[in-house]
Amino acid sequence: MKEYIIRLVYIEMLGHDASFGYIHAVKMTHDDSLYLKRTGYLAVTLFLNEDHDLIILIVNTIQKDLKSDNYLVVCAALNACCKLINEETIPAVVQQVVDLLGHAKEAVRKKAVMVLHRFFQKSPGSVNHLVSNFPKRLSDNDPGVMGATLFPLYDLITIDVNPYKDLVASFVNILKQVAERRLPKTYDYHQTPAPFIQIKLLKILALLGSGDKKSSEQMYTVIGDIMRKSDTASNIGNAILYECICCISSIQPSPKLLETAADAIANFLKSDSHNLKYMGIDALGRLIQISPDIAEQHQLAVIDCLEDPDDTLKRKTFELLYKMTKSSNVEVIVDRMIDYMISINDNHYKTETASRCVELAEQFAPSNHWFIQTMNKVFQHAGDLVNPKVAHNLMRLIAEGFGEDDDTADSQLRMSAVESYLKIVDEPKLPSAFLQVICWVLGEYGTADGKYSASYISGKLCDVAEAHSSDDTVKAYAVTALMKVYCFEKAAGRKTTLLPECQSLLEELSASHSADLQQRAYEFRAILDLDANAIENIMPLDASCEDIEIDTSLSFLDNYVQKAIEQGAEPYIPENERSGTLNISKIRNHNAYEISTHSLRFEAYEVPKPVVPAKIPSTVTYPTDLVPVTATISEPSYQPSVQPTWPLVPVSDAGSALGSTELKLRLDGVQKKWGKPTYSSGASSSSTSNFELDRNTVNGATKPDTAISKPREPRQSHVEVSEEKQKLAASLFGGTTSRSERKQSGKVSRTTNHGEDKVQSATVTVPITTAAQAQPHPPDLLDLGEPVGYTSSYSSTVDPFKQLEGLLDLSQDVNATAAGTSNGPDLMSLYSDADTNGNSNQNLNPVNGSVNPSKKPALLTKGPSLKDALDKDALVRQMGVNPTGQNPNLFSDLLG
Amino acid sequence: MIHFVLLISRQGKVRLTKWYSPYSQKERSKVIRELSGMILTRGPKLCNFVEWRGFKVVYKRYASLYFCMCINQDDNELEILEIIHHFVEILDRYFGSVCELDLIFSFQKAYYMLDEILIAGELQESSKKTVARLVSAQDSLVEAAKEEANSISNIIAQATK
């Protein structure tokens, strides 16, 4: 039997239906033999979902097994609990599970905790009274149980932080103990002490510390310790590092930790592993929200990731870019995003990217024209996927314009929109939402400045309606647009003749199956027969952005109601007060209200105001305004003609009626024009280069080699990177090219300084070194640029220091060979070489970098100068070098 | 939280599935199809994460088997990668250099082990020794039960002779 059940599990796993055997699996759980019982439980957990009918048959067995003496049986039952017990059956077992929290076996306690956690996830209400059990279990003797307790606590803290603030100290304490390897050796994972527990603790601390200075301060030390100790060579070490970064970015920021985090991110981004790059990008995205400037030093890495063939990495990078978009780089980023959006065909992500594009464009658009173009692209490629609200927003935006009071800008915007739409409209396969926007805009503004004739526009609109004959909404939009075009023409007193294709379209629509289309067609015809004056009243030019105030109390009908009551009608009783007997006159009365609501909505078109006003129209004006409406009601054609406009009305009126004249585009406080970067690249660049300069003058004398390799870094990366990338980087991060240029120029002068420095120190030491070492060993120093010097061994990578020591101290003879007599002049030549044609040096460097990646991070980190210098100082001291009289400045600078 | 664990062979055959969030049978096969299409086609040097329907799928290849776990957006991918590795190490320790055939022929054992490592979509035990101890305790019990059954059947057989 057992074999059969196992086969059944296999069948189910392969995706076939094995429901006929479920009952046997359930039966097997009743078996006394643990062997069979276990198989039964396994099968049942794999077969059944928590809402399956057979569950009820198992609950009893589970209850019995939870009481079993054999802890293995209890374990099996607890495992099954997680999967099978649903909200209704939780009360049946929950007490037993709680009792098991005190079980002698730690495996059972651990599972009991996890089961309670699961119950909590499923229905927080049923186990709320047991929540206090979790913090207690934190002090369990067994680290496994303690670790398991972290999961429910994490969930609880996510929901509400406050009750757990007092646990911060104990969490920190536990974390410290874990990091200090106080846990049993079995919890070590690849020489890292209990990493999974560490990660969970860090997650909890991140929650507890966010926005809480006091708690955060308690964590600083332990997080710093962990980051220092973590092993960057192994995956798990990096996982902890990443979690530390997440934690740092979420708690109250500490400048020192932020620096460490930035260094760690730099290492991630520079690694060859895509996983680490991915994590680096992710971490960067988190940290950037606290300190926006750190992205700058990683720009090239970010761009590499952006162009990576790995889709996941690319996507993550876009997420990062999305987070760091400013008005200065929005164009580049959105363009990239759109390109990417076009290239993918996964609807889920297409939608996401599209909505992000729209959001960014709305927030940061540098110019109206660009905005329209961008929206066109987005709609063209993902029109059916974006939220219809976006389309309405776009229409509203075009109608209301961007500028607060600049009418010419608005009309320019409209014209550019009309022009771009006229270009696009002929393309086949436009998404419906986009076509609606096009039709609306063409109808509303197509003929506004007289550049395009009515017949041209209407011809286009007819084409649209014909080409998309299956889409009723588009057709409706097109007909209404046509109607507007002709009305405007007529109102302007120009002679209009209906185009033949327009005629045929109307005929076709009059016989349409869709009542809406039919009505629109008839209205169109009726309106065309009216005289210019009436039309102007019905369809005033550019009325879409008039503000409409809806009088919900319908006060202007008071007179009418009053009259009706005087004539013997019963007063209207609100629906909730109405009794069961509902007489007809009331209903009629009610209907009257409804009709008037429609005419009210139309009111916007009745009150043409010259300029876009704020909400001036008051309810007082309505009764008088209503008069012409009621007058026209006598015309049979009027009533229907109300209808077509109002599907459009929500566009203009939804926003304004809700009392918002606020524009969707946030232009205030944001730099408007592209090209004037808001963020001061100049200042930052000069400061960084100054900073480098400072550092180098400090370090220069004693550590010329590191000093050389440092300036090399930016150059090297710029050589590697193609022109195009550089440009991209510049546009993304704002004026970097200028920065690098500046740096370079600074460097040249600096290197000369070093050259001189070095020469001095070298010449000073020459007499001493000659005595010790006769054999010159030029390659080490001379061919710095060549890989040979670096590849040889690790010791040669630390060479610079040792050579230096060789220069300074005779007792150090490890590498003193390097400091031969000939060094002085050679060095000179080297530096002058670097001076005159830095290019040759640069060209060699990439080789150098790739050969020796282990050294790269150390050299490339732009750490804090002081800390770096101190570290190096410590290293030098360790190696037995004492400060000599030759460089008294150095140490006073560093330590003083 | 881990939503499901999936073991797929390089040919797209499913070797083990464990669902911690409710999925109907239909959804399951759809998920498997989608993911195997996505993961198996990825190159070796790309990163081990795939974004999928608002979740992230972390996968790792061991010989001809892909181990995949689906997690939430805000989970730590590297950690999951290590959980996968942890699982594999435990399998390895149990079977003695595990291979795909081990998992095919005694996949229920792999399930038992997975149950000791993950419960309700969370890592419950990060100590390899504890897991090994529990699994072997269960095994020995099973052995005992088997022997008992054998001896009883022997007795019965003898008695009926």
Image (spheres, rainbow, N blue to C red):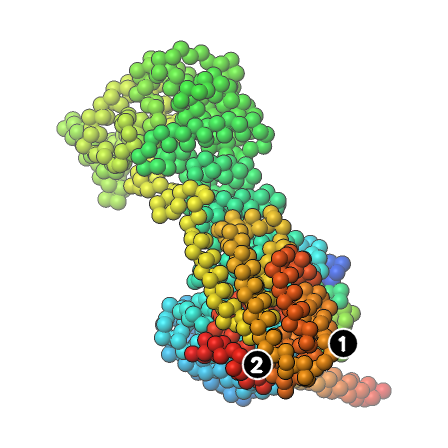
User: Could you say where residue A841 lies in the image, as x and y percent from the top left?
Assistant: 66, 60
Determine which residue is flagged by label 1.
B97
| Image quadrant where one finds the N terminus of chain A | bottom right
Tag 1: amino acid:
Ser
Depth-wise, is mark 2 or mark 1 nearer the camera? 2
Determine which residue is flagged by label 2.
A876
Near-viewer residue (B133 or A836): A836
| Image quadrant where one finds the C terminus of chain A | bottom left
Q: Is residue B29 visible?
A: no
Which residue, as the protein is rendered here, is positioned at the far front? A767
- Count of marks placed on residues: 2
Asked whether, in this view, residue A237 is left or right of residue B109, the answer is left
User: Could you say where residue B46 lies in the image, as x and y percent from the top left?
Assistant: 67, 59
Q: Residue at x 58, y 54 (%)?
A: A303
User: Could you say where residue A211 lies in the image, as x and y percent from the top left?
Assistant: 37, 68
Would you call the spot at circle 1 few (<14 residues within 10 Å), some (14-19), or many (20 or more)?
A: few
User: Could you say where residue A347 lies in the image, as x and y percent from the top left?
Assistant: 58, 46
Near-viewer residue (B36 or B142): B36
Tag 2: amino acid:
Val
